[in-house]
Amino acid sequence: MSLFLLSALVPLIEAFAGNFGIKTNLVSDALLSPNLGFEVGLARKWSLNASGQLNLWSVNDHKWRHWIVQPEARYWFCRAFTGHFIGIHAIGGEYNFADINADFTFLGSDFSQLRDKRFQGWGVGAGVAYGYAWPVAKHWNIEAEIGIGWIFTRFDAFPCTSCGTRLETGKSHNYYGPTKVAINIEYIF
């Protein structure tokens, strides 16, 4: 089945040659969050980017489980895949965080609560971004991007990493701040 799917994708990739890229975000990789992104050129100065992360494990009783998808429309000042760009993105996903030693408050969000409680919930939001892409070889780019925006999240709170007794149900929070930080390595077909 996968061989059939791959053979069906080859003509599609060839049709977008020079206008299709696959990438990974090294910042997410460093935070132990495997990720993958795709970008397709829509016009000379426009592209559509979509990235996602999936983390299904715990490290030393620290929960950092989540999945995130983040589609983005990009406007390039020169041409797609080269130079400066601005983007508008959406974000959505689910999470299960606990036992994380983050003793600080940032833009109205108290991250120190992650040390003593487990938070499980979902979030959606939107933001704007600025970035720059450096072509480093015929098919390779390095891309840096930063975005800011808003995320609405609804969650349940639990007193410990693995217990099932809820402390709070249906709590919500509005986060304003960075929504995207990326240093991508991209292969362009």
Image (cartoon, rainbow, N blue to C red):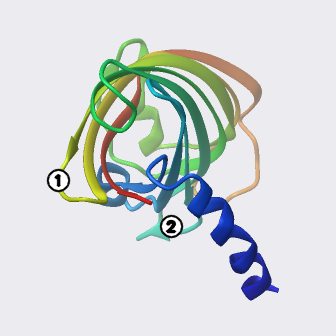
Q: Residue furthest right?
A: 1
x and y, in percent, of residue 109 in the image: 44, 20
Residue 58: assigned label = 2
58 horizontally vs 119: left or right: left
x and y, in percent, of residue 170 in the image: 79, 26
In this rendering, the label closer to the viewer, 2 or 1:
1
Residue 178: assigned label = none
In the rendered image, the vertical position of residue 155 relative to residue 174, given as above or below: below
Numbered disc 2: secondary structure: strand
x and y, in percent, of residue 87 in the image: 45, 21
Q: Quadrant of the N terminus?
A: bottom right
Q: Residue at x 44, y 58 (%)?
A: 33
165 horizontally vs 152: left or right: right
The residue lying toward the viewer, choosing from 126 and 156, is: 126
Judging by the rendered image, the residue that carries numbered circle 1 is 136
57 horizontally vs 178: left or right: right
The residue lying toward the viewer, choosing from 76 and 157, is: 76
In the rendered image, the vertical position of residue 26 relative to residue 168, given as above or below: below
| Residues at marks 2 and 1 touching, judged by CB atoms closer than 8 Å | no
Q: Is residue 151 visible?
A: no
Q: Quadrant of the C terminus?
A: bottom left
x and y, in percent, of residue 46 in the image: 50, 25
Q: Residue at x 25, y 59 (%)?
A: 138
Q: Is tag 2's residue or tag 1's residue first in the polypeptide sequence?
A: 2
Q: Residue at x 37, y 13 (%)?
A: 107
Q: Residue at x 40, y 49 (%)?
A: 100
